Amino acid sequence: MASRRVPKVTYKEGESQCKEKHAVLLSPVGKLEISGCETGLHEIKLPKMSVLPNGAEASAGCEVCEGAEEMTEPLKQCTAWLRAYFCEPARTEQLPVPPFHHPLLQRDSFTRQVLWTLLRDVKFGEAISYQKLADLAGNSRAARAVGGAMRSNPIPIIIPCHRVIRSSGQTGNYGGGNLMKEWLLSHEKLQKEKLAY
């Protein structure tokens, strides 16, 4: 497998306000609202799931249903990456991760360190405990702070906070709801098993 390409962070203190664009991607887990500018991705908003998608819905393709005509390059990269994630997961390793342009990912902080560590080190189909992620990010006593970092993650799925679970093996909480977290973990496990054959 190729090594993961980590996006460049492009943000300067005092930089002028960017022109935010929006797109909506219809995915197997519902409508993902994506925002960003020419510089990078700002945010992915997850829908709340009330039921798990069935087999037919889960294998449905991904399609941009709003905002396609005004997408910036980072938004195009994001939608291509998310399409691959849901429909052809092996391709995510070859695709560039879009650049990020969110203040939380620019400032030097433990939250930023945790999110970058998660993106870089926890691969598709893997899971990691809050405690182990705290160790990897450089502070073994900060498992609770890792939970806070997961809650504030502006780029879920791409920065895979759904892969962070409790030491007990329980999934723990998730911004998109526990059903979505379970679905994403199950999707990755199933796809990884398919790739192994």
Image (cartoon, rainbow, N blue to C red):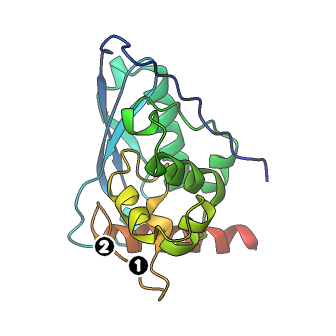
Which label belongs to residue 171? 1
- What is the distance, in whole Å, between disc 2 and disc 1 at their CAs? 8 Å
What is the x, y in percent for residue 5?
68, 39
What residue is shown with label 2?
178
Q: Amino acid at mark 1?
A: Thr
In the picture, measured across the screen, residue 13 lies left or right of residue 123, that is left
Mark drawn on residue 34 = none
- Residue 55 can be seen in this image: no
Q: Position of residue 38 (x, y in %)?
A: 43, 17
List x then y, in percent, for residue 180: 34, 67
The outermost residue toward the bottom is 168
Is disc 1 placed on a helix, strand or loop? Answer: loop
Note whether residue 105 is visible.
yes
Residue nearest the observer in this picture, 131 or 195: 131
Taking the view exactly as shown, the residue that stands out farthest to the right is 1
Placement of 182 over or under 86, stated as above or below: below
Quick check: marks 2 and 1 in contact, CB under 8 Å? yes
